Amino acid sequence: MAVKPQLGLIGLGTMGAALALNIAEKGFPIAVWNRTASVTRRFHSAAGALAERIVPAETLADLVAAMAAPRAIILMVPAGEAVDAQLSALAPLLGPQDLVIDAGNANFHDTDRRAAAGWPFRFMGIGVSGGEAGARHGPAIMAGGKPEDWARMAPVLRAIAARAEDGTPCADHMGEGGAGHFVKMVHNGIEYADMQMIAEVYGIMRDGLAMAAPEIAPVFARWNEGVLRSYLVEISAAVAAARDPVTGGPMLDMIVDAAGQKGTGRWTAIEAQHLGAPIPVIEAAVMARNVSARRAERAAGEALYGPAPEPAVVPLEDLEQALIAGKILCYAQGFAMMRAAAESFGWALDMPAIARVWRAGCIIRSAMLNDMAEALAEDPGRNLILAPFFANTLRRGLPALRRVVAAGALHGLGLPALSAGLAWFDMMRTARGTADMIQAQRDYFGLHGFQRRDGLDRPHGPWAEG
Ligand code: NDP
């Protein structure tokens, strides 16, 4: 290659290899290096016509030498120690105008720490969503870092990103430091919640309505034609329709009901607690994955208490409406959490821009994000449940959500995410809640004081006098 590339990539695993091919395909020459050199060679020889834009390097020093300054090197290695090790290894090789971009799933606190660490090079942390296919053909990209570094990388990141239906690239600058990884973390939390709510309505169809997986598949497929149009509903239809190549029966029926997790949903729940931001649907989804792992206890529970009471009778139309309502409630919570984070961490998070970035490329991409982007653009500080468009949708969906949650309770079908969304909504629509009792109790045992509704300055109750 005549011209040395200014772009480089470290870590040719699932995501890094796909991203490097995507970058080369969009016309950018790129140098690549992998810890295990045979992987680099294999990658290069399998790159076909794109190989001519890819410079394979045997060592880290070779990678840097193969590039022209100012360099921009993307790290696609496991989050945590591997990132710190690579940054340290690059430190003696790079100059002050070179830029290192951590594109893995870093915890945003680590990204904040690394951004402030005083490396001899520039540093950004970007969140990339969409799995391998996204990385190869167009992910959603949530970038953090200095605006000037975003400006430098934007042409590449926009070129490789997914495009929304209106043609806008799904890559944007979220804010400084860990802002990009924070937004990616909330994305993953919402992903957990979306998946859990879909699993809950699947459970009602399977256990409440005694529908077999091949009967459930067309229901999801039909929903995917309407308000619920989304990647996750689309793949739910596909997995429900799939046949097990071994037994010939439904694939779903052969899969153990214990969900794994890499922890980004848990991080979202933990950060929400730190921020005092209620995200009960996401928290319920994390909890549900943890309960799913306790198979032996669940089996013992069923043996002791018997199977659930008689099957639930819930119209499919109610399930669709409940899922629509639950989804709106979950996203309302997620955006409110990001507003709390923006305030707490001093980030100028642009809510409509976040909704727009999520419209394509990422796992939670859905038609509804168009409407969310519009509602957030009208008033970025307003909770989504107060936006007229979503208030109308919720008024339609809530009666169904109530019937579904009630049916779950009556018939012994656990619906933690849908129930949590409904409970949160009912609190959010109640001007006089029940925390007067909590305040009175706190004052009774701890003299914590309270505010009176009439504004009088009498901050304690008559308990001591009684
Ligand atoms: P893989 O396990 O497929 O690849 C990991 C890569 O990192 C390999 O190239 C490996 O090299 C290299 N590596 C591992 N440890 C070190 C180290 N200590 N020093 C240098 N290189 C190292 O991971 P993925 O591609 O799936 O994930 C990469 C990042 O992207 C992670 O942060 C992940 O969370 C994130 N991510 C993953 C998504 C996915 O769907 N898989 C989606 C979005 C983000 P070697 O060949 O030598 O082992």
Image (cartoon, rainbow, N blue to C red):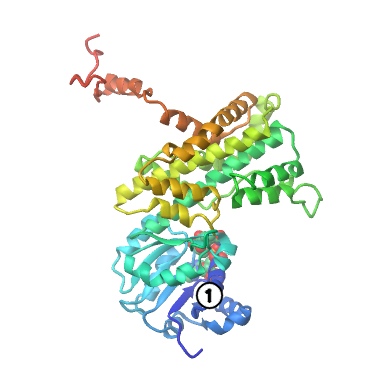
Q: Secondary structure at mark 1?
A: loop
Q: Amino acid at mark 1?
A: Lys
At which x and y percent is residue 195? 58, 45
Q: Is residue 271 visible?
A: no
Q: Residue furthest left?
A: 457
Determine whether 466 is above or below 126 in the image.
Answer: above
At which x and y percent is residue 334? 44, 45
Please tell me which residue lies in front, 361 or 167: 167
Q: Residue sitting at 68 percent across and 24 percent down?
A: 309
- Kindly indicate the quadrant of the structure image that contains residue 109: bottom left
Please tell me which residue lies in front, 237 or 44: 237
- Kindly indicate the quadrant of the structure image that contains residue 449: top left
| Quarter of the figure with the C terminus | top left
Crowdedness near tag 1: few (<14), some (14–19) or many (≥20) residues, C-alpha within 10 Å: some
Q: Tell me the residue that label 1 is attached to.
A: 26
At which x and y percent is residue 136? 57, 68
